[in-house]
């Protein structure tokens, strides 16, 4: 029995006239003779040529779109157009039948992305999602490589937590109590002492607070795991379950934090351009076709590959929140009341439309915004000397808006406690977090990168539900 080879290997190899076994799924079957076989290793299919006259008619009938097959034969130069080599099958076996009448994925009908979300368990078999999820794998590998090469420690932070890192309050509760008849205290409230963990617990919104504990021992750590927000938001940019990369670094100031984040993003893009060019080219063509359907003024000025290289080869512009507000206040869309949220003055919370204006229209480059008003940022961010702003930084990208959020953390115990009290964050519950400020505190900083937002940018997709295998959104937890 010859060794099973992947389609990608056969297509990229120069040699011919050798025996190989391939296994995969039928994409099409023409003239009772030509099978297009795909095994997921690449979007390209291997043509398998069979001798119809000497093949059992019952077997031929079972070669249908979606069926899993195994074929063994000689790899030979192809005489036909469209492929360099093909496999001349000596033996063919059906591994799994697929009824063409019932199979919901008929690729010849070019199914819409909306329809494919309804059959997300099968959408991996399309070229678009094949490309997306091979890139997702590669991007995750690039994340680990970047931090590993720099001596960071990968820390697994808890998914079940009793703290709310963001102060967001929109968390999923984790409980084993009987919801129909929960135990109650004398005051009539639910008695979480009776629950599995003996207290109220939730799914995490961030690994940051625990990450800081690791940074205070290892110097530099990163987390990469699922996070959850119970935000009732049905936009193309929000998920209830998504993945976050959160590095935390001791002895880093805000400048160091920005330098690392910029280097990190560029390293990820560089990795994908180098290792996933075939899939990127496919998605770039797909995006160009999609753009043609839009009105001229809504079309992107750059193609997908151009956009990636643009970010890779440009320095990110660094400006303060205060400078950004001045630019936005004087901008045409603000003066002509074209913004949905008009900028009246300092203190406004920037929306996606403002972030994208700065990046796409004003600077035409990625932008890092720093020094936000303390009122619109989290309790753990370090206060500036003006007592009005904090050492925060957000990285803004074309088409996406905010892709990274981070800050220098407040290392001063008294200042941090004061901020927590001002913002009604329970000091007692976070005494373990405050211990890092009691025992050998040091300046430190960190940021969070939403993995799916990065995926949107790299793939050119416009809906975040299309870059995670099984999206979790309000009223939807299929598969």
Image (spheres, rainbow, N blue to C red):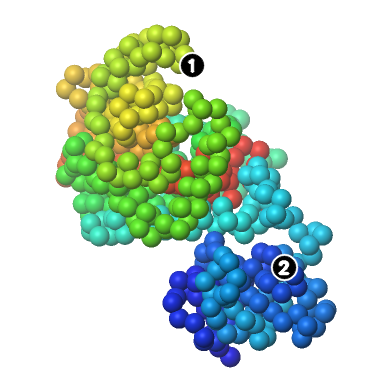
Above/below status of 30 relative to 439: below
User: Which one is earlier in the sequence, the residue at label 1 or at label 2?
Assistant: 2
Left of 356 or right of it: where is 415?
left
Q: Nearer the viewer, residue 323 or 275?
A: 275
Residue under circle 2?
30
Q: Can you name the residue that lies furthest to the bottom here?
A: 1
Q: Residues within 10 Å of mark 1 (few under 14, many from 20)?
A: few
Above/below status of 363 relative to 73: above
Residue 169 picture location, percent across and down: 48, 31
Left of 445 or right of it: where is 342?
right
Q: Residue at x 38, y 43 (%)?
A: 306
Residue 369 picture location, percent across and down: 29, 29
Q: Is residue 80 visible?
A: yes
Q: Is residue 420 visible?
A: no
Looking at the figure, which quarter contains the N terminus? bottom right
- Verify CB contact (< 8 Å) between mark 1 and mark 2: no
């Amino acid at each position: 029995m010859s060794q099973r080879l992947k389609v990608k290997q056969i297509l990229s190899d120069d040699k011919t006239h050798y025996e190989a076994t391939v296994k995969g799924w039928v994409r099409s079957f023409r003239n009772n003779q030509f099978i297009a076989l795909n095994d997921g290793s690449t979007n390209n299919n291997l043509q398998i040529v069979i001798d119809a006259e000497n093949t059992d008619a019952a077997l031929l009938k079972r070669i249908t779109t979606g069926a899993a097959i195994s074929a063994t034969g000689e790899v030979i130069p192809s005489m036909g157009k469209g492929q360099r080599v093909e496999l001349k099958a000596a033996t063919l076996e059906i591994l799994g039948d697929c009824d063409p009448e019932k199979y919901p994925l008929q690729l010849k009908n070019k199914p819409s992305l909306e329809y494919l979300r309804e059959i997300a368990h099968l959408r991996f078999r399309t070229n678009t999602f094949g490309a997306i999820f091979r890139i997702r794998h590669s991007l995750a590998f690039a994340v680990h490589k970047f931090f590993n090469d720099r001596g960071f420690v990968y820390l697994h932070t808890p998914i079940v937590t009793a703290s709310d890192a963001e102060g967001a309050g929109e968390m999923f509760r984790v409980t084993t109590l009987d919801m129909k008849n929960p135990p109650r205290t004398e005051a009539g409230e639910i008695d979480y002492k009776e629950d599995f963990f003996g207290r109220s617990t939730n799914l995490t919104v961030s690994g940051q607070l625990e990450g800081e504990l690791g940074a205070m021992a290892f110097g530099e750590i990163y987390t990469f795991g699922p996070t959850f927000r119970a935000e009732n938001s049905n936009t193309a940019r929000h998920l209830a379950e998504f993945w976050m990369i959160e590095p935390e670094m001791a002895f880093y100031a805000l400048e160091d934090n920005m330098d690392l984040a910029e280097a990190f993003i560029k390293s990820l893009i560089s990795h994908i351009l180098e290792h996933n060019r075939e899939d990127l080219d496919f998605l770039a063509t797909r995006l160009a076709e999609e753009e043609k359907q839009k009105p001229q003024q809504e079309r992107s000025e750059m193609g997908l590959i151009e956009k990636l290289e643009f970010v890779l080869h440009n320095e990110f512009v660094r400006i303060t929140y205060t400078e950004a507000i001045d630019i936005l206040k004087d901008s045409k869309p603000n003066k002509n009341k074209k913004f949905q949220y008009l900028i009246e003055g300092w203190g406004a919370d920037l929306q996606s439309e403002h972030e994208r204006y700065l990046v796409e229209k004003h600077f035409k480059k990625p932008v890092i915004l720093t020094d936000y008003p303390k009122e619109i940022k989290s309790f753990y961010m370090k206060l500036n000397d003006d007592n009005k702003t904090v050492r925060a930084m957000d990285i803004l990208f074309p088409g996406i808006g905010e892709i990274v959020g981070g800050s220098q953390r407040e290392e001063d115990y008294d200042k941090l406690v004061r901020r927590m009290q001002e913002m009604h964050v329970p000091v007692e519950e976070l005494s373990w977090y405050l211990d890092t400020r009691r025992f050998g505190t040091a300046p430190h900083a960190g940021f969070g990168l939403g993995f799916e937002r990065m995926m949107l940018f790299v793939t050119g997709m416009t809906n975040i539900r299309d870059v995670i295998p099984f999206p979790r959104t309000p009223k939807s937890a299929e598969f």
